[in-house]
Amino acid sequence: FKGQDEEQAAAADFLSKAFLVALFIMAIILVTQFNSFYHAFLILSAVILSTIGVMLGLLATGLPFSIVMTGVGIITLAGIVVNNNIVLIDTFDRLRKQVASPLDAILMTGAQRLRPVLLTTVTTVLGLLPMVLQINIDFVTREISQGAPSTQWWVQLSTAIVAGLTFATVLTLVITPSALMLRENFVAGRQARLEA
């Protein structure tokens, strides 16, 4: 038990450091790409939302939090949800230069990017559902079985990705446009106070 506990602690230490380094590198790239700390913070906030979704998904399914498999799922998930936010914010920045009203730019962004964001989420979730439901498809013998030993290894990882991605996508489609509008209202209010 002592050796297994030490290995688990070492894995947890490595994964937490890898996650923090990945977030730091993402933040640097996002700040240089968007030239805005606010946009970088908004994009990385999706990682926190997805982690909350992972915890809720594990609670709903009754699965334990595995340091290795759930940790890898959270790291994998971070890349997907960050990509969804990048797509939204990049489109908003492009449309904001063409449209006078920030509300119109946000509505046009939502209309243009709803399908790509939902397609990413739906295809990922549908692709991982056999692992979540522990379904094993044998193409050689044409048999479908449930609860095979090979599926049990991946249940926590796939459940973490499915739950986190579903939760974060729904909130990303609501929170990101709202946060963009909040910033535009704040900037407009500050300019009105300076002019007055």
Image (cartoon, rainbow, N blue to C red):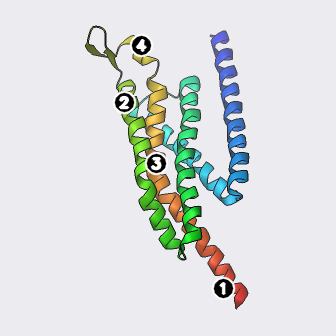
Q: How many marks?
A: 4
Alpha carbons under labels 2 and 4: distance apart: 15 Å
Circle 1 residue:
192
Residue extending farthest to the top is 141
In the displayed structure, 98 sits above or below 78; it is below
Amino acid of disc 2: Leu
Residue 150's tag is 4
Q: Residue at 68% across / 79% down in the picture? A: 190
Using residue 92 as the reference point, say whether residue 60 is left or right of it.
left
Q: Residue 129 has which mark? A: 2
At mark 3, the secondary structure is helix
- The amino acid sitting under disc 3 is Thr
Q: The residue tagged with tag 2: helix, strand or loop?
A: helix
Measured Cα–Cα span from mark 1 to mark 3: 34 Å
Label 3, label 4: how far apart the Cα atoms are:
29 Å
Task: Work out whether residue 143 or residue 164 is closer to the camera in this orientation and state it.
Answer: 143
Can residue 56 be seen here? The reply is: no
Q: Where's the N terminus, which quadrant?
A: top right
* Mark drawn on residue 169: 3
Q: Residue furthest front?
A: 98
User: How far across and how far down the image is residue 49, in percent?
Assistant: 54, 47
